[in-house]
Image (cartoon, grey):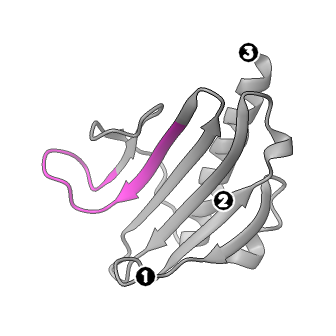
Amino acid sequence: MARRAVGHRLVSAWAFQSDAMSPRRLQLRLDATQYPEPVRAAKLDARWFEDGDYSIHYLERRDDGTWQCHWDRHPKPGTEPVHFHPSPSASGDVDPSEIDANPHLGILFEVLDRIEERVTTLYEK
């Protein structure tokens, strides 16, 4: 999955950052030269679980702080299992998410496409 992801134009490097809580955590470093100022760095952390749940967290480091959002599939009282934590803070508030592809590689590339749309929007501002 990581080798396929690094073929995306925004991805510059990857590493597995596993720990006891997230044994399947893939970190993708995104190419900061693809972003306009004030974005200084960007990354995507993807976690997958044996039951099919996932969490994909996108983070931009900017001159004025951070901008982040994430896509999840897991049980959450009061909302659908597949949901989105919107930017700029990715707080506890959730919106429905239409991203729920199978296999997980499909989810990852759908998220990368959304990030690419975000970069285009940043240049248009």
Residue type at the position of mark 3: Lys
**Residue 3 percent coordinates (x, y):** 76, 78
Q: Tell which of 70 and 14 is nearer to you.
A: 14
Residue at image coords 79%, 46%? 32
Q: Is residue 103 visible?
A: no
Of the numbered discs 3 and 2, the one sitting upstream in the chain is 2
Residue 125 numbered mark, or none: 3
Q: Is residue 116 above or below residue 56?
A: above
Q: Mark 2 highlights which residue? A: 109
Q: Nearer the viewer, mark 3 or mark 2?
A: 3
Residue at image coords 78%, 18%? 124
Q: Secondary structure at mark 3?
A: loop
Is residue 118 one of those drawn in magenta? no
Residue type at the position of mark 2: Phe
Q: Tell which of 121 and 61 is nearer to you.
A: 61
Q: Mark 1 highlights which residue? A: 19
Residue type at the position of mark 1: Asp
Picture quarter containing residue 79?
Answer: top left
Pointer 3 and pointer 2: residues touching (CB < 8 Å)?
no
Q: Is residue 12 above or below residue 2?
A: above
Q: Nearer the viewer, mark 2 or mark 1?
A: 1
Residue 79 numbered mark, or none: none
Residue at image coords 25%, 49%? 80
Horizontal relation, residue 89 to residue 60: left or right: left
